[in-house]
Image: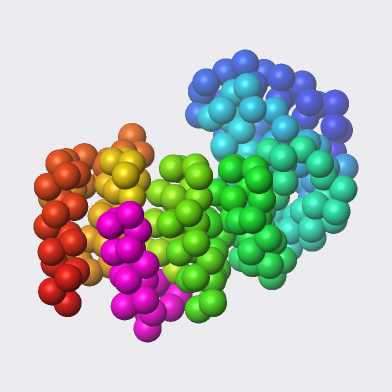
Amino acid sequence: MNLESLKEKYRSASESDSYEVHEDFIKMLLSSSELEVLNYHYDLLRERQNRELYLRLRAAFVKRGQAAANLLVEKLKNEREPAMRADILHLLGRMRHEAALPLAREAIQSPDGDFRDRGVYVLGWMGEIEDIDLLKGRLLNDPDPKVRADAATAHDQIKDNLPGAKNKLLANLKEGLEKEKDEKVCGWIIVTIQDIIKKSFGLKEDIEEGEVRGNVSAAKQKCLAHLSSL
C-alpha cells in the first residue's frame, strides 16, 4: 500500500467530524496488514486532537488480531509515553491477549492514574479470583476518584467470569460504599451493586453521558440496609 496516500487520507479525516469520512479512512487503513501500515496505525494513536477519530482508530486496532497484538507486546518494551503505554494495556485487554493480565497487575501500582485506571479495566475483563483483592485495594485506597469508580464497575465485569465470587464482590463493594465520601463514586458503587443483585435502589446509569442519575444519598441508605440484611 502507498503510505503517502494513507497519510493524505488521514489529513483529511483528521480535519473532519464526519463519521463517514472517518470510517472511509479506517476502511482504507485496515485493508493492509503490512508491517509499515501496522506501525503507522500504532503511531496514529499518538494523535488525539480529533478525539472521535482517535477513539475510532483505537477500536479499529483491535480488529487487526494476533499480528497487531504481537506488535503491541514488542512496542511495550521501549514505549515511554505514558498515554501510549496505557493504550497498549487497554488494547491488549480488549484483545484478551495473555500479556494483558500480568501487565494490568503491575499497572495498578503505577503512580500514573491513567495507567492504573486501564489496569482496573483489564482486571475486570480478564481477572482471576486473586485479582478481586487487587480491585478491592483500588476501590478502597486509590487517590483518584475515577480509578475508584472504575474499580467498582470492574467488580461487575469480573463477576461475569467468576460468578461464584458474587458474595466476595458484594462484600468489597459494601465496604467501599461505607468508606467512600465522593458522591459520584458512591453512585457508581451503587449502580454496580444494583447490576450484581438485580435490584434497584433508585439510581440509573446514563450510558450516553457516562453519568449516574438519581438521589445518591437516599440510594446509599437503601443499599446499605439491604446488604446488611443479607
Residue 63 in the image: state x and y as whole percent: 63, 53
- x 12%, y 47%: residue: 218
Which quadrant of the structure image shows residue 31? top right
Q: How is the image coloured?
A: rainbow
Residue 57 image point, x, y percent = 63, 38
Residue 30, compared with residue 198, is above or below; it is above
Q: How many marks?
A: 0
In the image, taking residue 116 as reference, residue 66 lies left or right, namely right
The stretch drawn in magenta includes residue 177: yes
On the rendered structure, is 58 left or right of 133? Answer: right
Question: Outermost residue toward the bottom?
Answer: 164
Residue 170, located in which quarter of the rendered image?
Answer: bottom left
Q: Residue 144 versus residue 154: which sits nearer the camera?
A: 144
Identity of the residue drawn at 13% across and 74% down: 229
Q: Is residue 130 above or below residue 108?
A: below
Could you say which is closer to the camera, residue 198 or residue 23?
198
Q: Position of residue 129 (x, y in %)?
A: 50, 78
The secondary structure that dominates the magenta segment is helix
Which of the image's four quarters has the C terminus?
Answer: bottom left
Which residue is situated farthest in the top direction here? 15
Q: In the displayed structure, would residue 203 be above or below residue 128? A: above
- Quarter of the figure that contains the N terminus: top right
Residue 167's image quarter? bottom left
Is residue 80 something that shows in the picture?
yes
Q: Nearer the viewer, residue 44 or 178?
A: 178
Q: Which residues are magenta?
A: 159-179
Residue at 35% in and 58% down: 176
Answer above or below: position of 163 versus 98: below
Residue 208: tell me if it is visible. no
Q: Residue at x 26, y 54 (%)?
A: 191
Q: Is residue 211 left or right of residue 26?
A: left
Q: Is residue 204 left or right of residue 163?
A: left
